[in-house]
Amino acid sequence: MRVAGICGVLDLEDGHLRQTHRSIGPRRKIDRVGEPSEGVKIICEGWAACVVHLPDGRRQILSFLIPGDLVSTTTLFRARQHFDVQSLTNVRYCVYSRPELLQEILEKPPVFERVLKLGVAEKNRADDAIVSLGRRSASARIAQLVIAMFERLTARGLALEQSFEFPLRQQQIADAMGLTTVHVSRVISAFRKERLIDIVERRLHIVDLKELRRVAGERSSLRGART
Amino acid sequence: MRVAGICGVLDLEDGHLRQTHRSIGPRRKIDRVGEPSEGVKIICEGWAACVVHLPDGRRQILSFLIPGDLVSTTTLFRARQHFDVQSLTNVRYCVYSRPELLQEILEKPPVFERVLKLGVAEKNRADDAIVSLGRRSASARIAQLVIAMFERLTARGLALEQSFEFPLRQQQIADAMGLTTVHVSRVISAFRKERLIDIVERRLHIVDLKELRRVAGERSSLRGART
DNA sequence: CGGAAACTTGATCGAATTCAAATAAGGTGG
DNA sequence: CCACCTTATTTGAATTCGATCAAGTTTCCG
């Protein structure tokens, strides 16, 4: 049965691919490190994150997932994941059977292309993260994050004007940006004071997009194909 | 005409796929930012790197490429690359026509699987980099780099005992690890003094692998499918 | 209402950067 | 083969960005 909307990104034809839909609360594991994902998943609603746990208890968030995102292209291949995927909010996602989807991919070039595109987008985001973590200051990284989420959410029609749902805790921002919560708090306070952004009730408002871009480092690179 | 060896990673059948081979010197661009790659390339000999240039002149190296590596899975898709690919040493690589390779992929599941696997390996390496840059100290990152290169080169039969060709300049290590040359020099000096590694004439010897792993952080995560 | 997360704020510390020079290693034309 | 020039590497001193330590305060839920 075809479910309308963003879940259908992979089901380009007449929607005959079998999908299972699931809903879960926040802080739940969608996929677990060391286990192969039992299917290929698309986030339909809510935010999730790919998380690596270090032996000393610290964490690194590899990426945030929002509606329309494929939960790691690597799940197309039946391999152990090296990270957990966990929900940050209430999440609804759908699961495709791996073999069925693979067959669909091989039979239908547009589906193949679509999946390839999602994979490219995912890799581009990882590359963005590497550049941010490797060469940008804390403020630049956080400004980048805000802008990146704004653009991704806008592309999916999930931003109004310059504001959008922003359920991230500062701890999660810290884990994604390679910082401490304390420092994230300081940077966000500074952004508020400088009237760059404002966060009220888990909703982020971009007050001065131009200046925010400047702070983010306004680099020309990494502006390639996104989804 | 089939060329033996590592170039053939994608050409699993009887080697009828057309390949063009090219040789270039060090510090040459194999692919250029903003331009779609004109084909799908495999490194046959030498080292290369994917490099992002920031507007202020600083650089971030996204990954190092060694023989057997695909030059970015994203080149399967005709999109603008957001980074340069450049040779670090003399490099020989081969180029497949994108349409021909795509057709081969769609027709031959083993080839499809092979390409998928290379893509997964690439993504895993990017994720490794994110964790290193986000959560590890300078020494841990450099130790990781040495171990990772050792393992990758070993998998391709390019390491003897615990030593291998290591053509990287400290500047390049710095650009990959998000550090300055000055600091890379200090860390490597310390490693030498502690008899962890030694670098002589662009060849790296791992003196104390166990201790090197300890320094690298000996984490259990991120030990997934590599190629 | 009460307890636990989440967020702030201040003081101090430290890893890595920056600035500055000196030394070593390569590569080139004569 | 050597003098010369450029690119790498090393080392030291001073600085800084973000971490760590330590309380508070606020917000969120059950």
Image: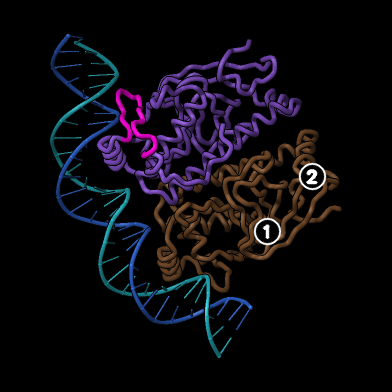
Chain colours: A brown, B purple, C cyan, D blue
Residue B88 visible (yes or no): yes
Question: Which residues are the magenta region?
Answer: B196-211
Element type where label 1 sits in the image: loop
Image quadrant in which you'd find residue A98? top right
* B78 vs B138, nearest the viewer: B138
Element type where label 2 sits in the image: loop
Q: Which residue is drawn at 55% across and 67% down?
A: A205
Q: Residue A157 carries which label?
A: 1
User: Residue B130, percent across and down?
Assistant: 48, 46
* A6 vs B67, nearest the viewer: B67
Q: Residue B92 carries which label?
A: none
User: Residue B31, percent across and down?
Assistant: 51, 29
* A70 vs A113, nearest the viewer: A70
- Does B59 lie within the magenta span? no
User: In the visual, does B198 lie left or right of B96?
Assistant: left
Distance between mark 2 and mark 1 Cα atoms: 19 Å
Q: Residue at x 40, y 47 (%)?
A: A135
Q: Mark 1 lies on which chain?
A: A
Given this view, does label 2 or label 1 mark the residue nearer the observer? 2
User: Residue A41, percent across and down?
Assistant: 71, 50
User: In the visual, does B112 lie left or right of A56?
Assistant: right
The mark nearer the N terminus, 2 or 1, is 2
User: Residue A168, percent across and down?
Assistant: 55, 64
Q: Which residue is drawn at 53% across and 36% down?
A: B34
Q: Are marks 2 and 1 on the same chain?
A: yes
Q: What residue type is labelled 2?
A: Leu
Q: Mark 2 lies on which chain?
A: A
Residue A214 visible (yes or no): no
Q: Residue A12 carries which label?
A: 2
Counting every numbered tag in the picture gives 2
Q: Are marks 2 and 1 in contact (CB under 8 Å)?
A: no
